[in-house]
Image: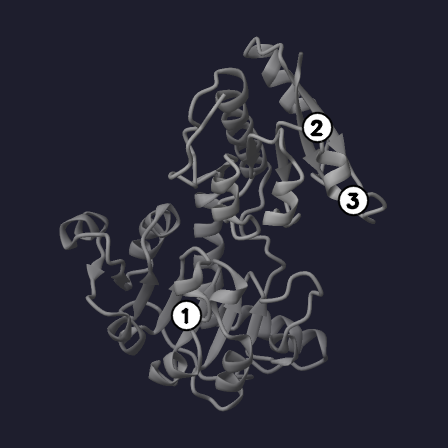
Amino acid sequence: MKKKVLYYNIDDTLDYERQLLREWAIPDIELVEVKDYEKKKDFVDHARDAEGVVVEYQQITREILAQLPRLKIVALQSIGVDHVDLQAATDHGVCVTNCPGFCSEEVALHAVGMMIDLVRKITMHDRSVRRGMWNPLYGYKTYRLSGRTVGLYFFGSIPQAMMPMLRALQVRVLVYAPTKSRAFLRRFGAEKVETFDELLMQSDILSLHCPLIPATTHLISERELKMMKGSAFLVNTSRGRVVDEAALAEAIREGEIRAAAVDVIEDEMTEKSPLFALENTVITPHSAFVSEDSFYSARKIALQQLVRRLHKQERPANLVNQDIIIQG
């Protein structure tokens, strides 16, 4: 009997995945695509007989997992896993996998591009010109980027991919990453700071690259923003809830920091944010990861995890809930 894998509200067809299964000679996995964006039918009804699911925005809760006794794996085509209850998945024996590194180059370029945009006021000038204003001095005062300090919060694959670009811009790079040694960071041309407060106080541009977990929820709030330089910029390409948006909006309005660029907001379901009303912000629609190359990379990685768990009956390489006990 074939093992059903449900692709739920995933863009594009599954032609690429089916071709890969043929090339890999995997005959016992059946891919089923369901596009029910209006939620005419409950997700559980779609997934009831699935042994694997691939979702993008669908929340996988303890209640949902309890109704899917055949489910063995949730394979995400993303890095973030915050929409899956990992403890509940572990309790139910369901593997959760992600795709670390699939879009590192794209997000790295996006983050550095946002830094340049803020320093050179590119988006701000574009908007002002389109409103009929031709004023090269419009907006906040700017400065040369060379010789300034860029602070990176955490140092995974994305910040590592940023380093050649940052070195070319001739900036000093400070990193707060407790798990990384000074020697390791030095190989990339970065310096280690021991405390987050030190990073906040020294950075001319602060760029966030952490997962969303309880410890990083509202990592940047009123206290942290008050510690930053009044001339500083904030860049967030991680997750929206890493930043307290109300506090950030207030800090920008009060001149506690100069401006911010974000690719993510706290509430992407309603697509509303207090940052939208501010001139000193650059906002993109969670698009930093997007390219044709990254899409196909994520799709291939997710399918590889499904094959390892369902066909080979092995632990997936990108298993997130490492404490799980796999049976069958």
Element carrying mark 3: loop
Residue type of the residue flagged with mark 2: Asp
Does dot 1 land on a helix, a strand or a loop? loop
SS assignment at label 2: loop
- Where residue 10 appears, as percent x and y from the top left, is 69, 39
Residue ID at (35%, 69%): 145
From this viewpoint, is residue 61 visible? no
Say which of 196 and 74 sits in front: 74
Which of discs 3 and 1 lies nearer the camera? The answer is 3
Give the residue furthest to the bottom: 254
Residue that label 2 marks: 49
Amino acid type, mark 3: Asp
Choose the circle earlier in sequence order: 2 or 3. 3
Q: Mark 2 packing: few (<14 Cα in 10 Å), some, or many (20+)?
A: some
The vertical placement of 280 against 105, above or below, is below
- The image quarter in which residue 196 lies: bottom left
Among the two numbered marks 2 and 1 on one chain, the one whose residue lies closer to the N terminus: 2
Q: Residue at x 62, y 27 (%)?
A: 51
Distance between mark 2 and mark 1 Cα atoms: 40 Å
Circle 1 residue:
219
The numbered disc on residue 42 is 3
